[in-house]
Amino acid sequence: MGKDTFDASAGLAFNLSLFERYRKNGQLQAEVHHIPGIRGHYRAYVHLVEGKVVSCTIEDKKGERQRITQEALIRADTARGPFEWKFMAVPAPPSTHPHAHISKPSTHIAPVPRIVAPLDLTMLAGWTEQQKLWLSKVYQTIDGQRNIEHIKKRVSLPPNVVEEALRILLTLKVIVIVSH
């Protein structure tokens, strides 16, 4: 295991609560079996952004993946485990804040977000409707032309919420930031 990987075999439910508390980005994975309604052994993946579960999938020996609910994985882990969960950390995305002291606003190269993948809000299991709405508002404002400061002014949310939404969208790999 590398320095960004550590043993998370204390049980899925316990680890998810810790990762949420400490707002970790990364992926949990384990070999799982005895999942109700699913036969055989699978590798399970739980993807986290800012400590929130954004998707859960299982992969069979042929490499075919299918979605599974977080609750089904927790039930199987509690009843038949705990399975040997491993966590691979993903570093937080780089800050999207332009630094005002670097140059004057008239000559500043303003970062511009661009959409590179669709935002699937159904994958954000465990997120509140308000959090999904905020992400959606920011995502819908991104047109590849507006810079971050313009997006903050255009979206009817506090600037810090817009910045957080942009960081989450970066981590979900649905947007990229380019300099203009």
Image: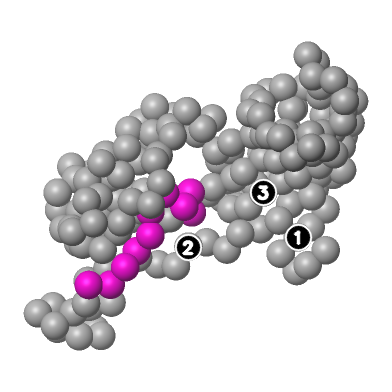
Q: Which mark is residue 102?
A: none
Distance (Cα) linking label 2 and label 1: 18 Å
Distance (Cα) linking label 1 and label 3: 10 Å
Q: Can residue 136 be seen in this snapshot?
A: yes
In this rendering, is residue 16 above or below 49? above
Residue corresponding to mark 3: 27
Q: Amino acid at mark 3?
A: Gln
Does label 1 or label 3 sit earlier along the sequence? 1
**Whole-percent x and y of residue 23?**
56, 50
**Whole-percent x and y of residue 144?**
23, 56
Task: State which region is magenta.
Answer: 171-180
In this orientation, which residue lies closer to the viewer: 77 or 59?
A: 59
Q: Amino acid at mark 2?
A: Pro
Q: Which mark is residue 93?
A: 2
- Residue at image coords 67%, 49%: 27
Q: Quadrant of the N terminus?
A: bottom right
